[in-house]
Amino acid sequence: MRVMESCLESRLWQELQYLVGATYIYLDRQGWLTELLAAFDMRLTAARKSNNRKDESWCLCTLGYTCWRRGELDKALAWYEQSLPAAYLAGYRPAEGATLTGIATIYHQQGKYELALETYQQSLSICQEIGDREGESKIINNIGMTYRVQGDNEQALSYYEQCLPIVKEIGDKIGAGTTLTNIAMIYRAQGDHAKALEYHQQDLAICRELGDKAGEAVTCWNIGLTYEDIDNLTKAEEYISRTVQIEEAIGSPNIVDSRDGLERVRAKRLAAQGPTGEK
């Protein structure tokens, strides 16, 4: 951060742009959002001083995204509303699409679902136009989520099923896992527990392949609940026990709820066995 400040003071615009770009993913993944805001604020100054319109629009978009990550929706929207015309004037379609996605996400969180769907569709058109398959898959998934929140499971499933071949094509295993989970949740809600388990198991295999312990814990939890739905309490206990085991190891904040779930399933299983220990 001090080197970035020195570059700003010395008017080294290109060097500042490079430094912020090189540290962006790290700061974001570490959750150092205050530093990320400061870094992109400096890069925005550099973009404006050097008359780099494309980078200006990208900085505005990223500032919006970072405020959204901090839960500051009004500030995020304010940045996005600056980014959108800047990206349009610069002819920078990636920033325009990313900004529209950010705005749509905020609309979704605000319960403005029709506006969210309309804005997602605008962003989707841009991703398809510029061949951004990763962006396309994420937007399609978000559209599915918006329909699901509204209770339209058929439309949601339709979009999730469009998303799945794209994430597989581009090798996005994390995106594939997310989509498989979403599909499984729809089938569970529809009472098709066999299909729900099939998709959850595919997701579980991906989590284990990637070494994603947090994801494995969540997926085992979902599998356990699905088995509980069909009164297969032995299997339910097996998977929820695995969730508790993982969450204890990684210090998950969900551990209390998971332990409560395990106790509930064990109590139901013991009650089902009866006083003699037989069903």
Image (tube, helix red, strand yellow):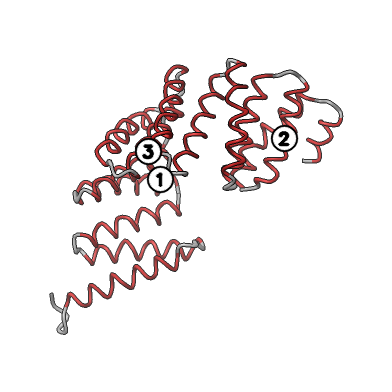
Q: Residues within 10 Å of mark 1 (few under 14, many from 20)?
A: few
Q: Which mark is residue 220?
A: none
**Which badge, 3 or 1, is on the more N-terminal residue?**
3
The local crowd at label 3, few if under 14, some if 14 to 19, many if 20 or more residues have their Cα within 10 Å, is many
Determine whether label 3 and label 2 are within 8 Å by CB: no
- Residue 24 falls in which quadrant of the image? top right
**151 or 178: nearer the viewer:** 151
Q: Residue furthest right?
A: 10
- Vertical side of 18 occupied by 31: above or below: below
Residue 90 location, quadrant:
top right
Question: At x 29% / y 44%, what residue is drawn?
Answer: 151
Earlier along the polypeptide chain: callout 3 or callout 2?
2
Q: Quadrant of the N terminus?
A: top right
Circle on res. 41: 2
Name the residue beneath numbered marker 1. 209
Helix, strand or loop under label 2: helix
In this figure, which residue is indicated by the disc labeled 3?
Answer: 176
Query: Viewer-proximal residue, 5 or 114?
Result: 114
Q: Depth check: 193 or 57 in front?
A: 57
Looking at the image, which residue is at 29% across and 59% down? 225
Residue 39, position as x, y percentages in the image: 72, 37
**Amino acid residing under circle 3:** Ala
The alpha-carbon separation of the residues under discs 1 and 2 comes to 38 Å
Q: CA distance from mark 3 to mark 2?
A: 34 Å
Q: Nearer the viewer, mark 1 or mark 2?
A: 2
Q: Amino acid at mark 1?
A: Glu
Q: Where does residue 239 sit, x and y in percent of width and height? A: 31, 61
Q: Residues within 10 Å of mark 2 (few under 14, many from 20)?
A: some
**Amino acid at the residue labelled 2:** Asp
Instruction: Say which residue appears at 46% left-offset and 44% top-offset.
Output: 109
- SS for dot 1: helix
